[in-house]
Image (cartoon, grey):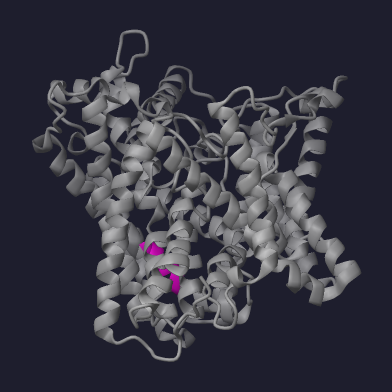
């Protein structure tokens, strides 16, 4: 197992093209296999979170098995070749995941299949782009009930897949543009830690790969043992499971107004603990502390008589969600201002100019494409501008905060509803723009840009040239975007969506249309409280940012405020706290030397949990055991 990675000799261009070819085969294989695992087996999703199972399994397989085997025959994979294979699979996660390959397909089909006089979906049909939905009623029915012969009606679907591929191609210009625009500033000037990228980089170290170090195996074994034991309890109920997720602590809050916290829980995610240890202490502190402060705010608002709930209108959740919106826009503004202030267009480097024009080209192209699909041009531009804001902030959270799961709880339609009323942009625009929303933003824990930026960090640290990275990852993303929907359609028409993962085939498609029918039937006016929440969230974020940069040793990083009340942080706040606490105690009583000596153990926690999930996926597939998720209590978002 202890075989050093070759770094002295740079691989030839021919070898790198060979690596790209192998990487495309790997991406296609994973995209195809994912349909069986996610949709039919319904276990741990291999494309879930900021550091998914599949890329880590690939990296470990290459380092632990392929490299030692090749070395016996006098061959070696260079560090940059292994990094390229990893980056290709990692960067394309969104497009081989079920989020992209099922949700936008089921959205259009579900609007027709589930239409009835009771739900009034027929009111939406005239706005649904005909280019994105099969016109044959039998094809729609077989999507959910299965085709008698199991065959996909490709004549109906190939034009639809072509439209989606074109849309995704335009999106890739935005993604690569933003990556190149901010990469140099974040890596070279601000020197962000990139905790997510540190895990694969620990495997690809020039000095001593992490798996050569004993603390790694100590950390690795802990989640393997825990999840191994819990996996046995799935097969043998007599074995008591170790409770890790959704452990209730809300029973401590019984009296008003504290009882608004009655659903509060703690969860143990070894991978989250590991990445929190790799994160800057002040950033990790902000994530869990601002979540607790946001809960205190909810108690105060409840005490003043505001009703709980009301995400879309009028309640406490609308106010706190408005604060999240304001925080995102304020943080995005500070990130963009940093580029504008220090780099006027004349002084931008060639790569940054490439990024800027690529982003603008993609943004304009996407706006025109979806206006062709039926939305107004101003609505499409506004939507994709907001989408870009969300992408950039979530990427910053991933690259600086190291959260294994990053997400926001608001949507662009929430913003227009809060400020101008729920039907202010028109039912036509809401319906058409739900399609790119479902394809690119829904399931926010797998938004595409963070994978790109973290992969770029891995590439720059392992000697990959910009040209090699661009060619490999671009082709990988296109391959994933083509293969994954084909694989999903094969499963859908063989088994029927009613027998596959309910979340992807049914739940979210109906959620979208039920929401809009409700808005159309009784649209709410602008929400003044939520609008004040937006203003307050933006103001507080700007204040925190100013204090953090101008007051020496100011302990509260503004990044944590952006996720203070999100569904994700509710699940991971306690694990972040444990990682932060472990790092703080080690630094205080052991110093930096002890911190670095124990760092491999926390990398092992991350890798161990992901490898445990992969192991049980293999076991469950062999025994055809459905529904065994190593991350229970963390449903698709």
Point out the residue furthest to the left here: 155
- Residue 346's place in the image compared with 532, above or below, is below
Label total for image: 0
Give percent across and percent down for residue 489: 23, 36
Does 538 sit left or right of 624 as displayed? right
Point out the residue furthest to the bottom here: 8
Q: Is residue 562 in sight in this rendering?
A: no
Q: Is residue 293 in sight in this rendering?
A: yes
Magenta span has 517? no
State which quadrant residue 21 falls in: bottom left
Does 251 sit left or right of 148 as displayed? right
State which quadrant residue 281 falls in: bottom right
Residue drawn at (64%, 48%), measured in percent from left and top? 223
Residue drawn at (63%, 77%), measured in percent from left and top? 191
- Residue 393's place in the image compared with 12, above or below, is above
Residue drawn at (14%, 21%), measured in percent from left and top? 148
Magenta segment boundaries in residue numbering:
174-180
Does 623 sit left or right of 4 as displayed? left
Q: Nearer the viewer, residue 244 or 186?
A: 244
Q: Nearer the viewer, residue 624 or 514?
A: 624
Magenta span has 178? yes
Residue drawn at (39%, 68%), measured in percent from left and top? 66
Point out the residue furthest to the front here: 72
Does 206 sit left or right of 193 as displayed? left
Give percent across and percent down for residue 372: 22, 46
Q: Nearer the viewer, residue 39 or 439?
A: 39
Give percent across and percent down for residue 585: 86, 62
Please identify the dominant SS of the magenta region: helix
Point out the residue furthest to the top here: 117
Q: Nearer the viewer, residue 440 or 385?
A: 440
Give percent across and percent down for residue 172: 34, 61
């Amino acid at each position: 197992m202890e075989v050093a990675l070759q770094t002295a000799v740079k691989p030839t261009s021919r070898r790198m093209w060979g690596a790209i070819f192998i990487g495309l085969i790997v991406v296609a294989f994973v995209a195809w296999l994912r349909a069986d695992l996610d949709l039919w087996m319904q276990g741990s999703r291999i494309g879930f979170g900021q550091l998914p199972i599949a890329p880590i399994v690939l990296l470990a397989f290459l380092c632990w098995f392929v490299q030692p085997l090749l070395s016996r025959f006098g061959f070696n994979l260079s560090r940059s070749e292994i990094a390229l294979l990893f980056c290709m699979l990692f960067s394309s996660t969104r497009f081989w995941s079920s989020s992209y390959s099922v949700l936008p397909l089921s959205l259009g089909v579900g609007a027709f299949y589930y239409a009835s006089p009771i739900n009034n979906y027929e009111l939406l049909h005239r706005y649904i782009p005909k280019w994105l939905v099969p016109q044959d009623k039998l094809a729609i029915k077989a999507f959910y009930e299965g085709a008698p012969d199991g065959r996909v009606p490709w004549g109906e679907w190939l034009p639809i897949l072509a439209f989606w591929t074109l849309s995704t191609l335009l999106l890739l210009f935005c993604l690569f543009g933003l990556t190149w625009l901010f990469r140099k500033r974040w890596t070279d000037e601000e020197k962000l830690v990139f905790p997510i990228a540190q895990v694969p980089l620990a495997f690809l170290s020039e000095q001593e790969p992490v798996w050569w170090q004993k603390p790694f195996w100590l950390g690795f074994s802990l989640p393997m043992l825990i999840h191994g034991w819990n996996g046995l309890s799935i097969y043998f109920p007599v074995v008591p499971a170790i409770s890790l997720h959704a452990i209730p602590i809300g029973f401590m809050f019984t009296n008003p107004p504290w009882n608004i916290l009655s659903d509060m829980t703690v969860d143990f995610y070894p991978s989250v603990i590991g990445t929190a240890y790799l994160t800057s202490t002040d950033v990790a502190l902000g994530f869990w502390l601002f979540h607790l402060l946001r809960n205190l705010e909810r108690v105060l608002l409840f005490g003043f008589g505001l009703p709980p709930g009301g995400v879309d209108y009028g309640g406490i959740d609308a106010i706190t969600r408005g604060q999240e919106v304001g925080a995102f826009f304020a943080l995005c503004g500070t990130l963009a201002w940093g580029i504008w202030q220090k780099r006027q267009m004349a002084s931008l480097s060639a790569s940054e100019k490439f990024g800027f024009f690529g982003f603008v080209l993609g943004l304009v192209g996407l706006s025109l494409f979806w206006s062709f699909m039926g939305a107004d041009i101003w609505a499409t531009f506004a939507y994709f501008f907001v989408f870009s804001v969300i992408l950039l902030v979530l990427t910053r959270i991933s690259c600086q905060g190291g959260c294994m799961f990053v997400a926001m709880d608001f949507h662009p339609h929430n913003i227009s509803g809060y400020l101008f009323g729920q039907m202010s942009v028109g039912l036509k625009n809401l319906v058409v723009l739900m399609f790119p929303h479902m394809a690119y933003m829904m399931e926010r824990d797998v938004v595409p840009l963070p994978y790109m930026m973290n992969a770029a960090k891995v590439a720059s640290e392992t000697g990959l040239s910009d040209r090699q990275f661009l060619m490999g990852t671009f082709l990988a993303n296109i391959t994933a975007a083509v293969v994954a929907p084909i694989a999903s359609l094969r499963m859908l028409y063989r088994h029927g969506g009613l027998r596959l993962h309910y979340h992807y085939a049914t739940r979210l498609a109906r959620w979208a249309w039920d929401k809009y029918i409700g808005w159309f039937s009784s649209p709410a006016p602008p929400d003044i409280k939520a609008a004040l929440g937006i203003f307050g969230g933006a103001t507080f974020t700007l204040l925190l940012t100013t204090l953090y940069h101008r007051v020496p040793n100011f302990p509260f990083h503004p990044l944590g405020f952006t996720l203070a009340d999100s569904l994700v942080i509710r699940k991971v706040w306690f694990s972040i706290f444990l990682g932060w606490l472990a790092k703080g105690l080690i630094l205080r009583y052991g110093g930096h030397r002890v911190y670095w000596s124990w760092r491999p153990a926390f990398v092992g926690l991350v890798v161990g949990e992901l490898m445990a999930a992969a192991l049980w996926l293999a076991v469950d597939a062999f025994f055809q055991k459905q529904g065994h998720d190593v991350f229970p209590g963390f449903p698709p978002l």
